[in-house]
Image (cartoon, helix red, strand yellow):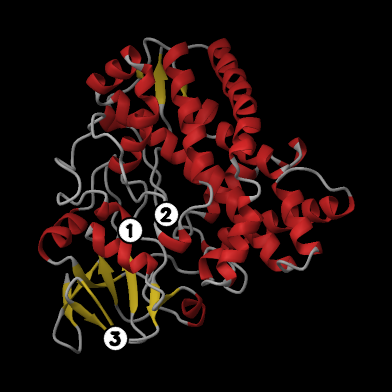
Amino acid sequence: MTGVAQDGRTVHDWTLEELPGLDFDPLLTMLLRDEPVARIQLPFGEGNAWLVTRYEDVKLASSDPRLSRKALAERAVTSGSPHAIAAKHAALNYTDPPHLNTLRRVVARAFTGKSMQRLRPMAQRTCDALLDEMERKGSPADLMEHLHGPFPLSVVSDLLGLPEEERWQMTDWANVIMAPRPAPGRSKEAKNTVRDVIVKLLDQRSAEPRDDLAGVLAAAHEAGEINKDEAISMATAILVSGAHAVRNNSANMVYALLTHPEHLSRLRAEPELLPQAVDELLRYIPHRNGVGLPRIATQDLEIGGVRIREGEAVYSSYLAANRDPAVFRDPDVIDFDRGPIAHLSFGFGPHHCVGSMLARMESEVLLATLLERCPRLALAVPPERIEWQEGALIRGPKTLPVSW
């Protein structure tokens, strides 16, 4: 369904209907081809917004200082969620440079190459232990239960410094927070529960400093670099997104490989291709429903030949940009021979994902270990019988039954 804006342009009603498997959104395909800067209306919020889909335009919209996330905190624009996932007054996502740069510098202290070297063997041990337990229970088994759920939660908890006794329900809470459409009330309850855990952890680190993310954030708060709400917000965002996004994206990668046996066979034969394959899968997989947060134009500007007026909201589709044929040859196919892949799956510009290095490491460990230990890994049911999550911001299977 479409409408018409005051300026006479078509407004596309983007209902964010559930798509089967890893099917790409047909509206994004159409807009990328025919109307790369278009007006859209999403299921919640007010009015309409611009949606930018071409690769170069998305990079511009993601980095132009005239487009503000901070201004978004004061607005109720058209949205794919009935309420804000993060607290608007303290979240990284609602901050602009230069303060955004300060927040990112603080968090980056826990995401160094040295930190990844420390975490990788811990991640490997966790992955091995989880697969040991799955093998003891026997084939077939649900990878979501045995691997994709507990593995990323364990890794991000190790990064944060979350004690074992606080971890057991975090995956469930993270999934509720990141699927707000079916249960807004439960989403709020989940956020409050996770916040209580984070506050307790940060208070512990203030009393007894440690070399983990919670310790980094507590020290930055003590030094006056960030306030307490910002420390809580950043810790919560990294824990929730790490547990939920990597859970689903790693499962999507395995599903993609199991439904593309020629690529699976090649990875088994050429394991050195794994880092490049992970990047190509990140580019190819439509890992979310809809788009993330928009930005607000603080003055008039032009994107893709279209005039954006001060005060208008602008969404950027990283998914569509990753399928731009002007940048990626045959963008709708998986190609492990693309070479260096400048995909936008982790965003671009000041809000580029701070956890991208961790997410890549987790995906490499999980895939390498699974392929090595399960040489006959296959779906235990036909692909069309796989159930997918409903109402989630990040797409992924509910269950992923496999045999080996």
Q: Amino acid at mark 1?
A: Gly
Residue at 49%, 19% (x, y): give it: 369
Q: Image quarter for residue 261?
A: top left
* Residue 44 versus residue 379 in the image, above or below: below
Residue 110 in percent (x, y) is at 65, 46
User: Which residue in the structure is indicated by mark 3?
Assistant: 309
| Circle 2 residue | 393
Asked whether residue 102 is in view, the answer is yes
Secondary structure found at label 2? loop
> Left or right: 211 with respect to 298?
right
Q: Considering depth in this image, is 261 or 278 the residue closer to the camera?
A: 278
**Mark with earlier residue (2, 1):** 1
Q: CA distance from mark 2 to mark 3?
A: 28 Å
- Where's the C terminus, which quadrant? top left
- Using the image, tell me which numbered label, if any, was put on residue 290: 1
The answer to whether 270 is drawn above or below residue 385 in the figure is: above
Q: Secondary structure at mark 3?
A: loop
Q: Which badge, 2 or 3, comes first in the chain's sequence?
A: 3
Name the kind of residue labelled 2 in the image. Answer: Leu
Q: Position of residue 291 (x, y in %)?
A: 35, 60
Callout 2 touching callout 3 (CB < 8 Å): no
Between label 2 and label 3, give the one nearer the viewer: 3
At label 3, the amino acid type is: Arg
Q: Position of residue 206 (x, y in %)?
A: 85, 55
Instruction: Please state if 157 lies on the left or on the right of 137 as rendered.
Output: right
